């Protein structure tokens, strides 16, 4: 049954225009940046501003990884909606009546989202590679073209990062059924990268940053920081012990969190909660459960007003109601607390 859920999710994305918009954005980010840097738009006057080749392994890693960080904002729409969309469209009751297991549903949804995310992110590399092959590029800015830097960039950094952060977003959004929290997680991850940069820059032993950086790029920097320009042009992307340890550490933690969430995930109506709802807050009007008759209530007589004063009072009333909703919203509270936390940390450093 898992293959049917997996195929259904892929077909769902392949028939949505948003999927092709994500692909187009990813492709043109890589393509336009490469051809603009390579002198395509000013080929007659383009000069060599850097001795480092645009298609050197280090340059390709930096370019693809940089745009991948921007594309993390697509992950909540891909991983976050994998399960939450069934509740948003109110089809979960029908789906849960089918004879599939929790394993089929959970991993069918997750694996399909993972494949879709990989496809989207692959188009950054395709755009970069297509830009290198575009005519009118300044040949002095380019070196020998090879697929190996692209394979290492995706194999060591991009795809593992998609999996790690996809797991976090999938867990948070599936547990709360609130996609907004997924975007807050992305903002948090980007902030923590800048925060980690501030912290690890003060640490003399760079091995700690190489081992503990969730994105893994400090592990690459540990080996390549003192390369000469010639070494940056010809040296392959490092696959040393710190790189492999970093990737194994964070992939292992991601798998642990995913397994823990799967253990407690249930095919149920209610979202995941740490608190048990009281009996009186659930199905309060269910007469069979609570044994209460449905009482008829006589409503008071009301009169309608449509004057200017009434409309002004309505404006303030609705504004107050929505303001109260915003400040009590879980996403707003979490984002505010994280903002204060990062501000205090940055001030400390």
Image (cartoon, grey):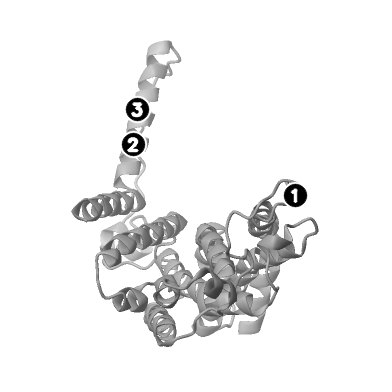
Image location of residue 11, percent across then percent down: 70, 69
**Spatial CA span between label 3 and label 1:** 61 Å
Q: Is residue 171 left or right of residue 290?
A: right
Across and down, in percent, residue 344 comes to: 21, 52
Camera-side residue: 344 or 42? Answer: 42
In this view, the residue farthest toward the bottom is 241
The residue at the point 44 percent across, 64 percent down is 173
**Residue neighbourhood size for the residue with mark 1, other residues' Cα within 10 Å, grouped as few (<14), some (14–19), many (≥20):** few
Q: x and y percent of residue 162 in the render?
A: 51, 71
Q: Which of labels 3 and 1 is toward the front? A: 1
Q: What's the distance in space between the residues labelled 3 and 2, CA to CA?
A: 10 Å
Question: To which residue does mark 3 refer?
Answer: 317
Does 231 sit left or right of 296 as displayed? right
- Which numbered marker is on residue 172? none
**Image quadrant for the C terminus?**
bottom left
Q: Secondary structure at mark 3?
A: helix
Which comes sooner in the sequence, label 3 or label 1? 1
Q: How many marks?
A: 3
The residue at 42%/12% (across/down) is 308
In front of the other: 47 or 4: 47
Q: Secondary structure at mark 2?
A: helix
> 256 or 94: which is nearer to us?
256
Mark 1 or 2, nearer chain start: 1
Which residue corresponds to mark 1? 43
3 or 2: mark nearer the eye: 2
Q: Which residue lies most toward the right here?
A: 135
Q: Residues within 10 Å of mark 3 (few under 14, many from 20)?
A: few
Q: Are marks 3 and 2 in contact (CB under 8 Å)?
A: no
Residue 85: image location, x then y, percent: 55, 61
Residue at 31% from the left image edge and 39% from the top image edge = 324
Numbered disc 1: secondary structure: loop
Residue 323 image label? 2
């Amino acid at each position: 049954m898992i293959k049917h859920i997996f195929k259904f999710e892929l077909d769902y994305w392949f028939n949505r225009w948003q999927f092709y918009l994500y692909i187009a954005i990813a492709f043109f980010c890589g393509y336009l940046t490469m051809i603009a840097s390579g002198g395509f738009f000013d080929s007659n006057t383009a000069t060599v501003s850097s001795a480092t080749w645009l298609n050197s392994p280090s340059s390709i890693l930096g370019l693809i990884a940089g745009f991948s960080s921007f594309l993390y904002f697509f992950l909540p729409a891909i991983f976050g909606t994998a399960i939450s969309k069934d509740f948003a469209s109110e089809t979960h009751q029908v789906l849960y009546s089918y004879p599939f297991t929790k394993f089929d549903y959970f991993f069918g949804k997750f694996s399909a989202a993972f494949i879709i995310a990989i496809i989207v992110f692959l188009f950054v590399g395709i755009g970069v590679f297509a830009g290198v092959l575009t005519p009118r590029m300044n040949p002095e800015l380019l070196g020998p073209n090879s697929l190996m830097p692209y394979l290492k960039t995706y194999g060591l950094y991009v795809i593992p990062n998609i999996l790690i952060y996809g797991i976090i977003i999938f867990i948070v959004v599936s547990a709360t059924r609130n996609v907004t929290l997924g975007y807050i997680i992305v903002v948090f991850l980007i902030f923590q990268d800048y925060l980690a940069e501030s912290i690890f820059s003060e640490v003399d032993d760079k091995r700690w940053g190489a081992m503990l950086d969730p994105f893994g790029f400090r592990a690459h920097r540990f080996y390549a920081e003192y390369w000469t320009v010639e070494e940056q042009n010809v040296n392959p992307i490092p696959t040393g012990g710190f790189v492999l340890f970093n990737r194994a550490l964070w992939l292992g933690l991601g798998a642990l969190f995913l397994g823990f969430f799967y253990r407690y995930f249930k095919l149920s109506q209610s979202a995941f909660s740490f608190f048990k709802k009281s009996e009186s807050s659930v199905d309060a009007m269910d007469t069979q459960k609570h044994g209460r008759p449905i009482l008829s209530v006589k409503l008071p007589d009301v009169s309608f007003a449509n004057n200017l004063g009434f409309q002004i009072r309505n404006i303030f009333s609705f504004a107050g109601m929505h303001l109260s909703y915003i400040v009590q919203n879980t996403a707003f509270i979490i984002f505010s607390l994280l903002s204060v936390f990062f501000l205090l940390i940055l001030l400390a450093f």
